[in-house]
Structures are given as C-alpha cells and as structure tokens.
C-alpha cells in the first residue's frame, strides 16, 4: 500500500463519530457555520487532506485514491473504527472511494455536490489562470507550505483530474451503507451525473435543493445541516408507493 499522510484534524462535540471531508483547494473551515453544527449531536472530525489546510503537501501526486487511503488510515488510526462519512465536492468523491474500498468503515454516507466520475463536472480544475484571491489567502493563512506552494498543489490536482482513469461504475455496487446524494439544482456537478450516481448506488436517497449552486453549504446552510442530521440520526421509513425501491428490494434482485 502507498505511504499515507497523517492528516491534521480538529475534533468537536461528543457522541457517535462523523467525519467531514472538505472540498478541493479548501480545508475543514469550509464547514464553518453549516455542518460544524452537527457537533451538538455527534463527535465530528474535520481532517485537512494532503496539501490542503494545515496538512502539508507530500512528494508525489495528489489523487483521489491517495486521499482515500489517507482517509482509511485516519478512520483506523484516529477515529478507531467505522464512522459516518460526509463529503462535500471533492471530499465526497474521496468519501465514495473509501466506501467502495472499505465498506466496513462506513456506517452511513452523505455525498454533497460530489462526482463519482470527474467527467460529471461541468468544468474541471485547471492550473491555468489566476485563482480567486480569497482562496489563495485562505490557503496561505494556515498552510505549513506557505503561499508560494499553492500553485504546486493546484498543478498536482489539475494533473490528476486530467490523467486519472475513469472509475468503473460497477464498483459502486460495493458500497453497502445507506447513502444520501445531495446537490443543488444549478450545481457544478451535472444533474444527469447526480441522478446516475443515485441510481447506481445499492441503497441511496436523492435530494436536489432548488435555487442552489455548488456553494449550497453557504447558500442553504441551515437546510443542508437539517437534512444531513436527519439522515444520520433516523432510519429510512417505508414509502407508500415505491417504484425503484420495490424493484431493488424484490427477492430476485438480490
């Protein structure tokens, strides 16, 4: 197995563990004022992935597979076992990869504005052009690598996006946890891709927020927090007129 990176993290609250995985080119602070409120119900962990936030970059690439392996090591070594995973944007892609590789470590899964296949993005990260000043400043504020290293991280991520092979959709059948797929109706991830992801997962529920973009954590913080908390704390109730779930739960479908 490739050497993993020890991720800096914050811990808050008490209760069952929930790991919040941030979006690309940001860090655990992206959950401030939205999903960090889950700490009143759970013990939440907010790790910064390799090359992000307070976790330094490491020699070599930054790929989804490497970040998934880092997260698996974090679950085993820091959390101490299975947890509920909540991933936003690229963090959702990482969470989904963890759930396919080690379903035993994922009790429930929430994917917010996440793509299984990066071809599902309307546009992809690029090393060309200038990054928003606020993004660069936020990186420089906490990164042990310093402001000048940010273009290196961007270049690594852009290279990975351009060169990583598309995952096999059949791999999604390995996910055993109940999963919430959540996106905005005007998201960076296409609705077609979001619906395809929902349909491919063995036990998934779908929510599309109206008047919401890829930044739905900021736009609809309370709504998203309530939806995620409800999903993580309650079991699925039978519906009165199931269609897809009736086919999925039929004896000959297993």
Image (spheres, helix red, strand yellow):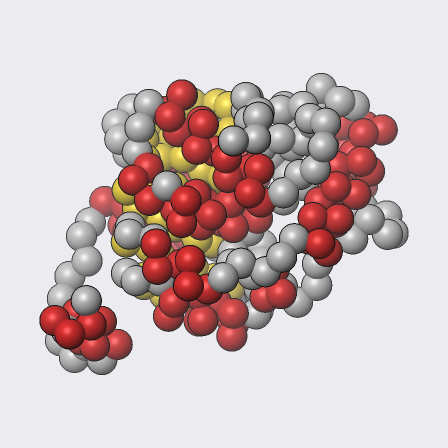
The answer to whether residue 29 is seen in the rendering is no
Report the quarter where the C terminus lies. Answer: bottom left
- In this view, the residue farthest toward the front is 1
The answer to whether residue 127 is seen in the rendering is yes
Residue 103 lies, with reference to residue 215, above or below; the image says: above
- In this view, the residue farthest toward the right is 129
Q: Residue at x 57, y 70 (%)?
A: 190
Residue 15 x %, y %: 26, 27
Nearer to us in this view, 106 or 89: 106
- In the rendered structure, the answer to whether residue 23 lies left or right of residue 206 reads right
Q: How many marks?
A: 0
Residue 128 lies, with reference to residue 205, above or below; the image says: above
Q: Residue at x 44, y 50 (%)?
A: 96
Residue 202 x %, y %: 30, 62
Q: Residue at x 81, y 29 (%)?
A: 149
Q: Residue at x 47, y 48 (%)?
A: 97
Nearer to us in this view, 165 or 222: 165
- In the rendered structure, the answer to whether residue 38 lies left or right of residue 167 reads left
Q: Quadrant of residue 37?
A: top left
Residue 211 x %, y %: 52, 68
Residue 230 x %, y %: 27, 50
């Amino acid at each position: 197995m490739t050497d993993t990176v020890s991720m800096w993290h914050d811990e808050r609250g008490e209760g069952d563990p929930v790991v919040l995985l941030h979006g690309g080119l940001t860090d655990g602070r992206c959950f401030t004022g939205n999903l960090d409120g889950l700490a009143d119900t759970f013990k939440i962990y907010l790790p910064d992935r390799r090359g992000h936030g307070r976790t330094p970059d490491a020699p070599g690439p930054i790929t989804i597979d490497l970040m998934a392996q880092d997260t698996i090591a974090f679950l085993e070594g820091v959390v101490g076992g299975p947890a509920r995973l909540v991933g936003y944007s690229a963090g959702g892609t990482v969470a989904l990869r963890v759930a396919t590789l080690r379903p035993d470590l994922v009790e429930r899964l929430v994917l917010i504005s996440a793509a299984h296949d990066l071809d599902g993005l309307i546009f992809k990260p690029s090393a060309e052009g200038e990054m928003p000043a606020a993004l660069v400043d936020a990186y420089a504020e906490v990164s042990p690598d310093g402001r000048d290293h940010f273009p290196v991280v961007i270049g690594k991520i852009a290279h990975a996006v351009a060169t990583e092979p598309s995952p096999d959709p059949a791999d999604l059948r390995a996910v055993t946890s109940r999963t919430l797929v959540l996106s905005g109706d005007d998201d960076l991830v296409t609705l077609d891709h979001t619906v395809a992801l929902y349909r491919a997962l063995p036990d998934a529920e779908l929510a599309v927020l109206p008047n919401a973009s890829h930044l739905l954590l900021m736009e609809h913080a309370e709504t998203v927090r309530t939806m995620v908390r409800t999903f993580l704390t309650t079991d699925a109730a039978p519906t009165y007129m199931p269609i897809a779930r009736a086919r999925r739960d039929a004896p000959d479908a297993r």
